Amino acid sequence: MRRSILAGLSCLAGAFLISDALAIEHKIGAHLRFRYELWDNLITLGTNQTANSYKDRSFFRLRAMLWDDIKFNNQTFLRIRLNTEPKYHMGPHYLVLKDGKKRKFDQDEIVIDNLYLDIKRPACLPLDLRIGRQDFLGPDTYGEGFLILDGTPGDGSRTFYFNALRVRWYPHSNHTIDFVAVRQTDRDIYLPSIYPSYDDGRGLLYINEKKRLTGSNEIAFWIYGRSRLSPNLSLEPYYIYKKEEKTTTTTVSSATVPKNYLHNIGARLVYSINKDFKVRAELVHQFGEYSETGIDRRAWGGYIFFEKTFPNVAMKPLLEIGYVHLTGDDPGTTKDESFNPIFSRNPNWNELIIYTYLLETMQKGGAIPGYWTNLRMPLVRLRLNPTNKMSLTLSYQKLLADEKTMGLPSFMFSNSGKNRGDLFLSIVNYRFTKRIDGMLQYELFDPGSFYSKDAKTAHFFRAQIQWRY
């Protein structure tokens, strides 16, 4: 591990020295995130723990990032960032590789998770260009990340990057339009990794000594507009095309992705009724085809949230009441109506449920969590600020299926009910200093009739501390 870290530092130092002769300014940054996680009855809701991948988990994970933002002039910038996240498993789940041995320590690889060039207003045109490996997070997030957030869901929250070309056009001071083309691969084939990791022999977690990043190779293109129509109203219309190629790097037939393509036409709207009351809503229509079978795809997805702040009340509460609807496949039709989360296989509204989706959606998205689909979910969320350094989030979420399922494993699913169950969530965040903060997260899920009678209550716990420089 020490050798891999030293190699990573040498790589970044080399880039620094080469650019130093040309650059006006460097901005070095670093981030360490240390987590402990406990998964209790998550994957199969405790109905089957025979396979190692189904077993409960208790583990530590340390993500380390080091980067350099290089400014050549007021128009040209370069970012390079290295990333790694080793894990230590304490059982009963362990890392099992091609040789069949159980390992507690997953050393991980050091990867280049950001490497892009920014060019502002080339030739005085009303455009910005960003070329290379980049995240769509923070100020670059598309809406609330409902469809576009994580380009590499296979490695969890280690990386989020897209291999992309983004052109941002400024036709008016209140309007921008992004044109984006991306190419994602099931493992990183474009940039080298330092100290390659493992091969599990099945293509589930590792492929040829590189971590699995997506369910299959993918290409996509989108046009995304942002318009401030009035001081209180903003609109974000978009079109997204995505093609998922057939999986070729897994030996597990139930975890393969069929060749398919999907068009997405939608819009997000945010309306501020007053300074303390806001409405957020998004709706998308999906249509396409599973290429090898010719099955048509037709799906809808969307949400609406009413957000009210109380700035003059103790602890400054923020109350959200919302509803999420993602269509499921109707077994009574010849079409497939199941919603596809596109590039948003991440903890959108909770963390626990994304793992219970694994066995439900393997045949559509591979063995990667977070394939949000077939869901109706009313929820309420309350955020409080007990002190200037502490925030508390509490949420109740009622989860329902849009359609009943057919043919899913009977040890976990009833294949007859629509009540997924009730989820309770709490998160405490605390800022110790300007650079150090911590978090505690606990979720409890009580399964309903959507699952088998043997399904047990599931628990998710996380403790985190992170440091930024």
Image (spheres, rainbow, N blue to C red):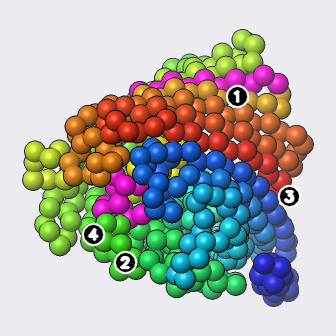
- Element on which disc 4 rests: loop
Label 3 Cα neighbours within 10 Å, binned few <14 / some 14-19 / many ≥20: few
The residue lying at 63 percent from left, 80 percent from top is 197
* Residue 33 occupies quadrant: bottom right
Q: Report the residue marked by disc 1.
A: 392
Mark toward the start of the polypeptide (2 vs 1): 2
Q: CA distance from mark 2 to mark 1?
A: 44 Å
Q: Amino acid at mark 3?
A: Tyr
* Residue 343 occupies quadrant: bottom left
Q: CA distance from mark 2 to mark 4?
A: 14 Å
Where is residue 61? Give x, y as percent.
71, 59
- Element on which disc 3 rests: loop
Q: Is residue 320 left or right of residue 146?
A: right
Mark toward the start of the polypeptide (2 vs 3): 2
Total labels: the figure holds 4
**Of residues 379 and 461, which is closer to you in this image?**
461
Q: Amino acid at mark 4?
A: Pro
Question: Range of the magenta residues?
Answer: 358-387
Q: Is residue 331 above or below residue 315?
A: below
Q: CA distance from mark 3 to mark 1?
A: 25 Å
Where is residue 405? Give x, y as percent.
23, 45
Q: CA distance from mark 1 to mark 4?
A: 42 Å
Q: Nearer the viewer, mark 2 or mark 1?
A: 2
Q: Nearer the viewer, mark 4 or mark 3?
A: 4
Q: Report the residue marked by disc 3.
A: 469
Q: Is residue 193 above or below residue 227?
A: below
Mark toward the start of the polypeptide (4 vs 3): 4
Q: Amino acid at mark 2?
A: Thr
Residue 365 is inside the magenta segment: yes
